[in-house]
Amino acid sequence: MAEGARVVRAYGHPGSARTRARPRTKGRQLHPAAVERVRALLGDRPRRRDLLIEHLHLIQDSQGCLAPDDMAALADEMKLALTEIYETATFYAHFDVLDDGEARPPPLTVRVCDSLTCEMMGADALIEALEGGAGEGVRIVRAPCIGACDRAPAAEVGHNQMSNATTERVIAALADGRTRPEIPDYVGFDDYVADGGYQMLRECRDGSRPVEGVIEALENSSLRGLGGAGFPTGRKWTFVRAEPGPRYLAINADEGEPGTFKDRYFLETDPHRFLEGMLIADWAVEAEETYIYLRDEYPVAHKILIEEIARLEREGLAEPGSIVLRRGAGAYICGEESAMLESIEGKRGLPRHKPPFPAQVGLFGQPTLINNVETLYWVPDILANGPDWFAGKGRNGRKGLRTFSVSGRVKQPGVKIAEAGITARELIDEYCGGMADGHVFKGYLPGGASGGILPASMADIPLDFGTLEEHGCLIGSAAVIVLSDRDSAADAALNLMRFFEDESCGQCTPCRAGCEKSVGLMRQPKWDEPLLRELSRAMIDASICGLGQAAPNGLLTALRHFPEDIPDG
């Protein structure tokens, strides 16, 4: 009886005064108009948990924000707790999640990149001018790297990426309503097939090329993961293939590293070479499904892939629905492989603890092969020309080809396909037309924001995996940003640390607090070098993933190689 009495006192019983006095049902109530709107947007799409981010995109694109009533309607429609909707939506920068009573954002957003190359090329002045001159109904937002560093400063007007942006050009685009992406000429299906495309895939599928021979060719070619990790491709395929099925293939096309734009180049110019490599990988590991995770900043690539994947299905080269294109939502951390898997599953992009590794426990808990766009781009050519063709390229004792994203103070920035082991000096002189007029070579970032900063006196080091680590640097995704005598290495390091502060997922304290504290210390008129080094060591040793572990690289190499640039009060 005592136990029962406690239950009645706590919750009341039907007809009790406590129950009758309650003015309304607890929790957020569904708004009929929002329910109808969300149902219409979702249509006959499945309501699965892994589609949550895609459904949030539908609402954001349609309404310009994620209002509370729409979020509640989506939670009801997907049979998820409202907290699950909010924790995912608020994680991603491209979702505008409103509080009760909060005004909707202006109907149009202009995102101006303020990462290192764009800052060097005048992004701050552009932002200031647009804030005062863009007009009513336009929101100006500082954005991290949008993958257009070769065309800096870069901006997105709505979803139209603008190269070499100026105030006048942005305002003209706003006036003309040019807010959607324009699709450039690219190698389409017919042209690709006419040049021998998909022959390697057909030979794999008809038994002319056994799986073991394909993997052996990749091993002998020295092809490695070119998203930054550099793991041997053939070995990775072997590991995944050895695991019990079902297996998945996940393509990492979320290149958010400042200075990197090579995957965008391949997807926007020659998508079928990548798609053929992807289908060969799918065949090799007998994947149940293939997921392409594409960053939201690449609307042109998104449109191209939708078109060309549909064409593959019509041509019988892909089973309908077997290739799934997933759109990111503005989170650099999702370039980390396990965070990408979490995002594909419709969750926050929080890196997983390892082991187990994705090859064993990956997407939806199953063995998963994860490859980068550039890695798969080379697969058809390696099979067609033989492994020695690829391995025979290279300088200074290195093997293979690399796609360098070059930006900064050079005459001809852009994507440069060069031999592995080329030096920064050779890259600038042979592929970029030399330094920009009036600029003297001072230093360079060999591997984007995570790769550290080296002086021009060290520009003869071969650029490849394993050659830069002793100098405190990494090649990563081969994003080379060139600095001149007009740039400060300390300012560059601060820009990089601000980026990591903004992009930290917040899961682990060393990265979350370490980036924030480092930025604060680096903004002081005098840098506290011992404290900055101690903080960096904690981040390197204790962060969960590569973001926090590599975030101090720019700072530490600036201290090491550019003491003359360090603020001393």
Image: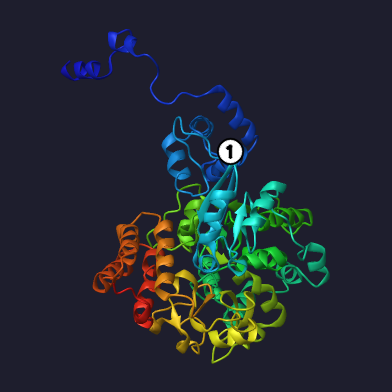
Q: According to the image, label 1 marks what residue?
A: 59
Q: Tag 1: Cα neighbours inside 10 Å, few (<14), some, or many (≥20)?
A: many
Q: Residue 225: where, in percent of width, then height?
A: 54, 72
Asked if 283 appears above or below 25 in the picture, the reply is below
Residue nearer the viewer, 489 or 422? 489
State how many labels appear. Answer: 1
Q: How is the image coloured?
A: rainbow
In the current view of this chain or complex, which residue is farthest to the left? 2
Q: Residue 362: where, in percent of width, then height?
A: 48, 58
Residue nearer the viewer, 148 or 288? 148
Residue type for callout 1: Ile
Asked if 426 appears above or below 271 in the picture, the reply is below
Quadrant of the image containing the C terminus: bottom left
Residue nearer the viewer, 93 or 200? 93
In which quadrant of the rendered view does residue 390 lie?
A: bottom right
Q: Residue 223: where, in percent of width, then height?
A: 58, 78
Q: Residue 230: where, in percent of width, then height?
A: 50, 75
Q: Is residue 280 visible?
A: no
Residue at image point 34% right, 78% down: 559
Residue nearer the viewer, 224 or 209? 224
Asked if 464 appears above or below 177 in the picture, the reply is below
- Residue 566 lies left or right of residue 296; in this view the side is left
Residue at image point 17% right, 15% down: 1
Q: Secondary structure at mark 1?
A: helix
Residue at image point 52% right, 23% down: 31
In the current view of this chain or complex, which residue is farthest to the bottom? 396
Q: Is residue 77 visible?
A: yes
